[in-house]
Image (tube, grey):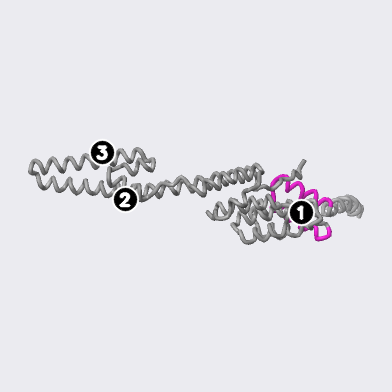
Amino acid sequence: MKIIFISLLISIPAFCQLNNLHTPQNKKLFADYLFCEQDYLRAAEEYISLGETFLSDTILYKIAKSYSIIGDYENSLNYFSRIPQSSFFYDNSLKEIGKIYYLNQDDTSLDKLIDEDENSFNELLKLKIALKLVKNQTDDLERLLSNSDEEFFVLKRFYQQRKNPDYKSELVAGILSAIVPGWGKIYTEEYGDGVTAFLLTGIFTYLAYDNFKNDHKFRGYLFTGIASGFYLGNIYGSVASAQIFNAKVDFNFLESLSDFLINRNYFVKEYDFCK
């Protein structure tokens, strides 16, 4: 009996201490810890488990940010949209929503967001311009780029690149290679392939001519066929090379634009909640 009594005396404080771990204050501290450890999914779940009464603007923002970081944009939009207009985080939450619309390439929702808001207009407008550049919709963009802000100036440079890309003409590439084998490849900056095409076509053409000249008709026709194959192949290859060159121009443009937006964090301010 005495042993049972002593065990009860020991277990009661331990039970009370364990119960205290599940108080809202301690759960919030644990959620904050998870957030700062970048365990965003568990952090969001812990914050949500606090219940609606304890979901302050700061916690709503951290839940939404956690979901955004892990790519759960549906939940992220839900919690960002719950932040009231009176909140310190309201303006930045709109920018975060705009960022999600940009990443989802949802220009319709982004336009509506810009129409509804004035405080974040410049940042959201930059995202709208960037999205139009991604989709190669350059009409009417110059009017939107009249702002003298430094980032608008950079976007204007991107607009000029998109409006007047450094493409190579497929027709010109084909015609050049038809005139001089390999010339179209050199035009598309495939210099090695261009020289190779010129040499191979030239060598087999000469061999065909030389064999016909010496009355070796079979070899003459054989080398003529090979030379013709290289000649036609170099024309086709030059057209394809122009297409590949233009695809690289588009790819490099989109990569540069993406790097610019990532470096600017899509024009969204970051808060350090872990100091």
Identify the element where label 1 is drawn. Answer: helix
Residue 229 at x, y = what percent?
24, 49
Which of disc 3 and disc 1 is earlier in sequence? 1
Residue matched to label 2: 236
Which of disc 3 and disc 2 is earlier in sequence? 3
Residue 100 at x, y = what percent?
64, 55
Q: Main secondary structure of the magenta part?
A: helix
Question: What residue is rendered at 13% in x and 45% in y?
Answer: 220
Q: Residues within 10 Å of mark 2 (few under 14, many from 20)?
A: some
Identify the element where label 3 is drawn. Answer: helix
Between 87 and 153, which is closer to the camera in this rendering?
153
Q: For the residue marked with disc 3, what is the amino acid?
A: Leu
30 left or right, relative to 174 = right
Between 92 and 148, which is closer to the camera in this rendering?
148
Q: For the residue marked with disc 1, what is the amino acid?
A: Tyr
Distance of label 2 from label 3 (alpha carbons): 17 Å
Distance of label 2 from label 1 (alpha carbons): 57 Å
Which of disc 1 and disc 2 is earlier in sequence? 1
Q: Is residue 198 visible?
A: yes
Residue 102 at x, y = what percent?
62, 54
Residues marked 2 and 3 touching at CB (< 8 Å): no
Q: Is 261 contained in the magenta span?
A: no
219 left or right, relative to 267 = left
Vertical comparison of 53 with 89: above or below? below
Question: What residue is rendered at 62% in x and 49% in y?
Answer: 145
Q: Residues within 10 Å of mark 1 (few under 14, many from 20)?
A: many
Kindly identify which numbered label has been placed on residue 199.
3
Between 198 and 65, which is closer to the camera in this rendering?
198
Residue matched to label 1: 90
The span picked out in magenta is 25-53
Distance of label 1 from label 3 (alpha carbons): 67 Å
Q: For the residue marked with disc 2, what is the amino acid?
A: Tyr
